[in-house]
Amino acid sequence: MDTALYIKLSLVMGLEYAIWGAWMPVLAARLLGPLKFSGKQTGWIYAALPLACIVSPLLAGQIADKWINAEWILVVSHLIGAGLLFFAATREKFGSLLIAMLLWSVFFAGTLPIVNAVLFSKVSDGYWIGWVFFWAPTGWALTGYLLTGIRHIFKTAERGRDCLFLAAALSIVMACCCLLLPQTQPAGTGGTPVLDALAMLKAADFLVFVIVSLVVAGLMQFYFLGSAQLMIDSGIPAKNISAIMAIAQACQAIATFLVMQRLIDAVGYKWTLVIGAACWMILYFVYVLGKPRPLVIVSQSLHGLAYVLFIIVGQKYANSLAPEKIINSVQALIFAATTGIGLFLGTHFAGIVMDHFKKDDKFQWRPVFAVPAVITLVSVIVLIVFLKG
């Protein structure tokens, strides 16, 4: 693979997730703290991106497959996104901030499948694809360290809006980097790419894959919403939680270029997806046990492995089935199902389950995590029985 092309694709992949990672882990502290938003209001701010992912990826995929070069969609979307993030950083009322974040989400969500589609259209070697994907979790993690450094130097943590300013600045850098990408022209076919992608659901194999992906991705919200509090309740100091959960990102980065393609080559897409979903199943069962603490800590690696072996491999699997003329739309369909419908419904489902098993203001973690554990077990069985090898 050409070194210059690898650098360009890696920069774009890293920055795509750095923008997201700049605000998502820490914005809630601003909303619940200085802005005094309620938990429900905070939930709606965080639901904006999954909501946008239901529609925007499909629209962006249609445009990229039929009318406009993919790199120009990325440039324009991120420049508009930068302006919306700067605006959001200045908002202190729930209504205006929600509108700003929802509009940003509409533009950002459309870029997620396009970044993947550009990579898949330019690189066919699975190992080099893994090396590019390596920069997704790395970009997310490095942005967290950068924000920490900014807060130590400039003392900006108290108001908390610095995360949105950083995301906006990264969006501008991203737009500039996208200008360096090689041209990725639309196929310009006479059909309707989005409808052609949806027509692939007529194949039972692909339909099973999409439905299971939607379910398993949605259940991730149990991990995101419950992990920190579960560990605190088990006696792990709150100051250590962030570092412990970062184990998942480290494992994700390593698995992306050391495990993913080797496992696909060895056992195929079906069993790689099964192993990925099973990693989450095991993690949830460890959470049901809740002890010993070292096991709970080590189990964070399972989330990183699962994300690579199920989510990223799922994107590669969908690409392997997609006709070249609708690659963007097929990637969009997967993002709409997982990051869109899955995460949106999963957020609300996890919240309902957690509230149902709350007693004396404390969550009963064993029954809470038994729910995703059992559902994921069923999902694994469905993949084994119904997905072709």
Image (spheres, rainbow, N blue to C red):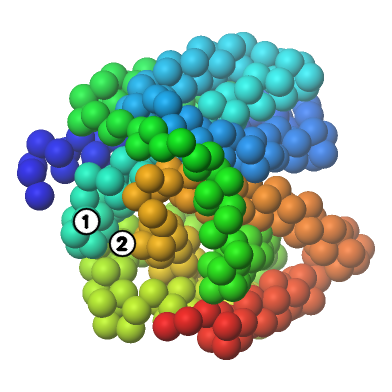
Query: Which residue is painted at 42% across and 83% down in the image?
Result: 389
Q: Position of residue 210 (x, y in %)?
A: 58, 63
Q: Pick out the residue farthest to the front.
A: 190
Q: Is residue 320 visible in this depiction of the protein? A: yes
Please give the residue where the numbered disc 2 appears in the rendered image.
256
Report crowding for label 2: few under 14, some 14 to 19, many 20 or more residues within 10 A (C-alpha). Answer: many
Please give the residue where the numbered disc 1 appears in the rendered image.
124
Q: Dividing the picture into quarters, in which one does residue 9 lie?
A: top left
Q: Position of residue 242 (x, y in %)?
A: 50, 52
Q: Nearer the viewer, residue 196 or 1?
A: 196
On the picture, is 62 further left or further right than 216? left
Q: Marks 1 and 2, how far apart in space? A: 16 Å
| Three-letter amino acid code at the position of disc 1 | Ser
Q: Position of residue 61 (x, y in %)?
A: 48, 38
In this rendering, the label closer to the viewer, 1 or 2: 1
Q: Nearer the viewer, residue 237 or 162?
A: 162
Query: Which residue is painted at 57% across and 88% down in the image?
Result: 385
Relative to 253, is 300 above or below? below
Determine whether label 1 and label 2 are within 8 Å by CB.
no
On the picture, is 186 further left or further right than 190? left
Q: Position of residue 122 (x, y in %)?
A: 22, 45
Q: Give the mark count.
A: 2
Report crowding for label 1: few under 14, some 14 to 19, many 20 or more residues within 10 A (C-alpha). Answer: few
Relative to 297, is 43 above or below? above
| Three-letter amino acid code at the position of disc 2 | Thr
Q: Dividing the picture into quarters, in which one does residue 265 lie?
A: bottom left
Query: Which residue is painted at 63% across and 77% down in the image?
Result: 379
Query: Which residue is painted at 38% across and 45% down in the image?
Result: 325
Q: Is residue 20 visible in this depiction of the protein? A: no
Badge 2 marks a residue whose secondary structure is helix
On the picture, is 127 further left or further right than 162? left
Badge 1 marks a residue whose secondary structure is loop
